[in-house]
């Protein structure tokens, strides 16, 4: 069984985001970039399936500018078998990404596609759902547990107020939530080995699909600065302040 794992290169989750002075977006100059954390979880899950003997091949695919190849190499160092790099310098929306991924799915025929539930840069949480719709495949989103058995995927989903279990007929789409697993670090020998793993490259334009943006960002702004806290002497003073200063009780 082949597993396809789409991964996105995003601003590292530890970086304090700076908004460009003209409000046109986030400043990416000299900013550390990494694999989207939910995608690391997706890669880890695919590797565990291969280790369990369920999956045979793991393909990591990413769409973005040239440096995106580094992120694919990270997935290869974690344990993916080969990479597909779709070069594209323009910022893509989830529909454009899903259309390109659909082409990759049609070319590779995986039984399972594991995406992150959302990219932490745009927080869209749309690509997996759109890909499932474009392919007409079942989807199990926000997975905290995945079990494969006899052509079926049993996905435990994190929903408001609890867990929901769905059974999907494969081929299917799964999107990873935080508690699905804890991704491994790539070891130095595996980082070296990853340099030799196959990484195919193709420009996005060669897929012949419409990836034009549908949205226009009007403005990006920093959240309002938080006011400093205050230490109170006792509960009575806290209640007094909440009543008379904050006016919340
Ligand atoms: P989003 O819908 O943008 O929040 O992204 C959800 C998931 O779609 C990510 O966690 C990735 O698995 C996948 N994805 C989004 N953008 C890309 C991209 N440029 N290349 C590959 N996969 C992507």
Image: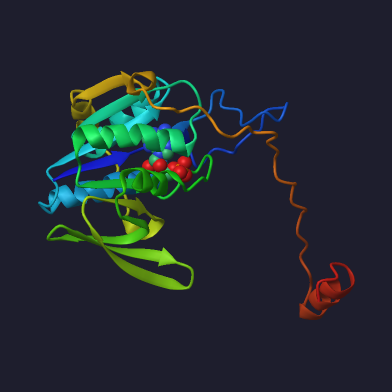
Specify the color scheme: rainbow
Q: Is residue 216 visible?
A: yes
Q: Quadrant of the C terminus?
A: bottom right
Q: Is residue 220 left or right of residue 192?
A: right
In the rendered image, residue 139, in percent from the top left (x then y), is placed at 33, 55
Residue at x 30%, y 42% (from the top left corner)? 185
Residue 3 image offset from top left, x and y in percent: 21, 43
In the displayed structure, 8 sits above or below 171; it is: above
Asked if residue 238 lies left or right of residue 6, the reply is: right
Q: Residue furthest bottom?
A: 236
Q: Please identify the quarter of the rendering in which residue 196 is found.
A: top left
Q: Name the residue nearer the viewer: 143 or 194.
A: 143
Q: Residue furthest left?
A: 53
| Front position in the image: 30 or 217 | 217
Residue ID at (12%, 43%)? 56
Image coordinates for residue 91, horizontal then vertical, percent: 51, 27
Q: Position of residue 90 (x, y in %)?
A: 49, 23
Q: Residue at x 34, y 25 (%)?
A: 86
In the depicted view, which residue is nearer to us: 236 or 227?
227
Work out whether 76 lies above or below 144.
above
**Image position of 23 with respect to 205: above or below:** below
> Which quadrant does ligand 1 occupy?
top left
Q: On the image, which quarter does residue 7 sit in?
A: top left
Q: Is 170 in front, or is 178?
A: 170
């Amino acid at each position: 069984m082949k597993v396809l794992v789409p991964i996105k290169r995003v601003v590292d989750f530890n970086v304090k985001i700076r908004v460009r002075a003209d409000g046109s977006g986030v400043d990416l100059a000299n900013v550390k970039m990494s694999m989207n954390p939910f995608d690391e979880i997706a890669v880890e899950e695919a590797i565990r399936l291969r280790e369990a003997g369920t999956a045979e091949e793991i393909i990591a695919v990413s769409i973005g500018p040239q440096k995106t190849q580094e992120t694919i190499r990270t997935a290869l160092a974690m344990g993916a078998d080969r990479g597909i790099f779709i070069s594209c310098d323009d910022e893509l929306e989830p529909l454009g990404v899903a259309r390109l991924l659909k082409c990759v799915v049609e070319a590779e025929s995986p039984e399972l596609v594991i995406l992150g539930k959302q990219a932490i840069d745009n927080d869209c949480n749309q690509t997996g759902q759109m890909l499932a719709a474009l392919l007409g495949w079942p989807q199990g989103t926000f997975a905290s547990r995945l079990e494969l058995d006899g052509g079926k995927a049993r996905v435990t989903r994190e929903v408001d107020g609890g867990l929901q279990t769905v059974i999907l007929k494969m081929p299917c789409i799964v999107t990873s939530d935080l508690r699905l697993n804890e991704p491994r670090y790539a070891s130095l020998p595996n980082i070296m080995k990853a340099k030799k793993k196959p990484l195919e490259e193709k420009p996005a334009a060669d897929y012949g699909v419409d990836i034009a943006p549908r949205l226009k960002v009007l403005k990006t702004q920093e959240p309002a600065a938080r006011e400093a806290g205050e230490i109170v002497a006792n509960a009575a003073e806290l209640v007094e302040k909440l009543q008379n200063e904050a006016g919340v009780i």
